[in-house]
Image: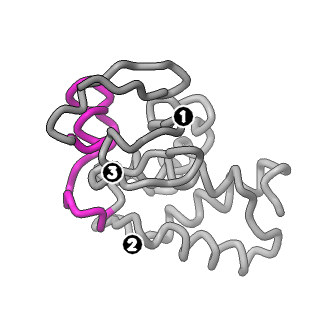
Amino acid sequence: MSHTLVVDGRPREVDVAGLPSLAAVLREQLHLTAAKVACGRGECGACTVLVGGRPTMSCITPAVLVREPVETSEGLADESRDLREHFADTGAFQCGFCTPGQVVHACALLRAGLPADDGARREHVRHALSGNICRCTGYQAIVDSVCSVADERPEVHS
């Protein structure tokens, strides 16, 4: 059974027979492998993509139900360049398994805008990214990176 997904701005025909997850379709049919399937239960965030601009756990989302545009880590490469550079500079990359999901979710946060007050901004980022589990970094470098990018992008402050 064929279904059209708009992925990173391009319409793509995919096979949804057997009700594969969005993550499976992205990885196996479209060869977009940044979204990782770790838990397979929507609990860790490693598979996060944006669907209609909203962070979505692709491992538990049936591809056949996706009607809005999908943005992957690969498709957000240009937009997230400064964010990924900050991740590297602060040590927010360690094993790297969770990083694509963290970066995708952070892109959505930055698009939506963050509080101008540093304390409120940090708390907002911590809370928003709490669904993206990282076993290596302790999260502080991730929060620092997102907040630093928010400081450098004046349009980010709400």
Residue 109 on image: x %, y %: 63, 57
Which one is in front in this view, the residue at disc 3 or the one at disc 2? 3
Badge 1 crowding class, 10 Å Cα cut-off, few under 14, some 14 to 19, many 20 or more, is some
Badge 3 crowding class, 10 Å Cα cut-off, few under 14, some 14 to 19, many 20 or more, is some
7 left or right, relative to 82: left
Q: Which residue is under mark 2?
A: 138
Mark before the other along the chain sequence, 3 or 2: 3
Residue toward you, 131 or 99: 131
Labelled pair 3, 1 in contact (Cβ < 8 Å): no
Q: Which residues are magenta?
A: 20-44
Does 64 appear above or below 90?
above
Instruction: Give the residue type that dot 1 points to.
Output: Leu
Our reading of the magenta stretch's main secondary structure is loop
157 left or right, relative to 111: right
Q: How many marks?
A: 3
SS of the residue at dot 3?
loop
Labelled pair 2, 1 in contact (Cβ < 8 Å): no
Instruction: Give the residue type that dot 2 points to.
Output: Gly
Q: Is residue 119 magenta?
A: no
Mark before the other along the chain sequence, 2 or 1: 1
Residue 22 on image: x %, y %: 31, 41
Badge 2 crowding class, 10 Å Cα cut-off, few under 14, some 14 to 19, many 20 or more, is few
Q: Residue at x 38, y 44 (%)?
A: 65
Residue 119 on image: x %, y %: 72, 80
Instruction: Give the residue type that dot 3 points to.
Output: Thr
Q: Which residue is under mark 3?
A: 61
Q: Which residue is under mark 1?
A: 76
Residue toward you, 100 or 62: 62
SS of the residue at dot 1?
loop
- Distance Cα–Cα, label 3 vs label 2: 28 Å
